[in-house]
Image (spheres, rainbow, N blue to C red):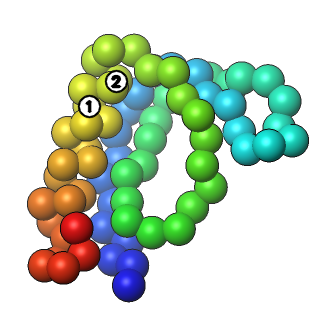
């Protein structure tokens, strides 16, 4: 079951898309949610990594029991 709880944050870094995608691109915002999505590899500033950790924790704390 997917809750689609979403936490949006401003970030600063670079990302590379899925197989077949070429090159790195700049990222300026991120979304954390529980649900299916495309995945990318990211390199973040320390500040952005900390913001991402907080956003992940916020989504997990908001999830109904049993969906963590």
Q: Residues within 10 Å of mark 1 (few under 14, many from 20)?
A: some
Where is 67 relative to 51, above or below? below
- Asked which quadrant contains residue 1, the reply is bottom left
Give percent across and percent down for residue 63: 19, 70
Give percent across and percent down for residue 21: 83, 38
- Asked which quadrant contains residue 23, the reply is top right
Where is 57 relative to 10, above or below? below
* Near-viewer residue (6 or 42): 42
Q: Are marks 2 and 1 in contact (CB under 8 Å)?
A: yes
Where is 59 relative to 26, above or below? below
Q: What's the mark number on residue 51?
A: 1
Q: Residue furthest bottom?
A: 1
Under tag 2, what secondary structure? helix
Q: Residue at x 18, y 48 (%)?
A: 57
**Visible in this render: residue 44?**
yes
Q: Residue at x 68, y 31 (%)?
A: 16
**Visible in this render: residue 27?**
no
- Asked which quadrant contains residue 65, the reply is bottom left
Q: What's the mark number on residue 48?
A: 2
Q: What's the mark number on residue 29?
A: none
């Amino acid at each position: 079951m997917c809750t689609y709880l979403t936490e949006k944050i401003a970030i600063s870094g670079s990302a590379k898309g899925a197989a077949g995608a070429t090159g790195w691109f700049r990222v300026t915002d991120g979304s954390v949610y529980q649900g299916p999505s495309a995945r990318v590899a990211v390199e973040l500033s320390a500040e952005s990594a900390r913001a991402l950790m907080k956003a992940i924790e916020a989504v997990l704390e908001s999830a109904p029991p049993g969906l963590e």
